[in-house]
Structure formats: structure tokens, C-alpha cells
Amino acid sequence: MSLNEDKLYLLTSMGLHSGSLMGGHYTSLCKNQDEFYLYNDEYIKPIKREELGVINMNSVYMVVYELS
């Protein structure tokens, strides 16, 4: 792969934080076999693609991409 070649990155996961700087709660949103899941302390919930657009982007503190 040359440095001038266009690259495509795919979102694989996001770390989310709710609360304040003094305390809060962490969850993650991860892709598994082309489906996204919300991982919380007590459950794992499948997330529909249309629900991804309503995530509060202020709660995202980390994103992970893979080179396609």
C-alpha cells in the first residue's frame, strides 16, 4: 500500500462516559459481525443502525477504527 493511496476506516467501537469529571459510568458500543451492541455492567443490548445517530456525541471519549 502506498502512502498516496486512499484509505477507508470503519468504526468498530466507542467508549462512552456519562456523569461528570468527579464520577460517572462507562459503557461501550462495539461492532460484532456487522451489528452494534451496547455493553453495560449488567447487560448487552443490540443497537439498530438508526439508533446510532441519536448517541450523545458529548459522551464519546474514545473511538476505535479498523483499516478496511
Image (cartoon, helix red, strand yellow):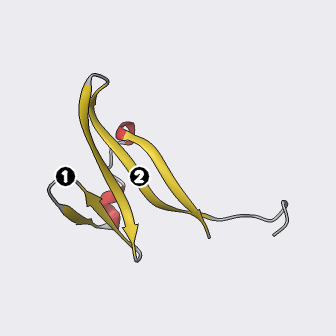
The front one of 16 and 58 is: 16
Q: Residue furthest front?
A: 41
Whole-number angstrom distance, CA of label 1 to CA of label 2: 16 Å
In the drawing, does residue 17 fall left or right of residue 8? left
Query: What secondary structure is marked by label 1?
Result: loop
Q: Could you tell me residue 60's position as x and y percent? A: 39, 42
- Say which residue label 2 marks: 14
Query: What secondary structure is marked by label 2?
Result: strand
The front one of 11 and 52 is: 11
Quadrant where the image shows the C terminus: bottom right
Q: Which residue lies furthest to the top in this view?
A: 22
Dot 2 crowding, Cα within 10 Å, few <14, some 14–19, many 20+: some
Kindly check if marks 1 and 2 are in contact, taking CB atoms under 8 A apart as contact: no
N-terminal-most mark, 1 or 2: 2
Image disc number at residue 41:
1
Q: What residue type is labelled 1?
A: Asp
Q: What residue type is labelled 2?
A: Met
Q: Answer above or below: position of 1 versus 60.
A: below
In the drawing, does residue 46 fall left or right of residue 2? left
* Residue depicted at x 40% and y 77%: 33
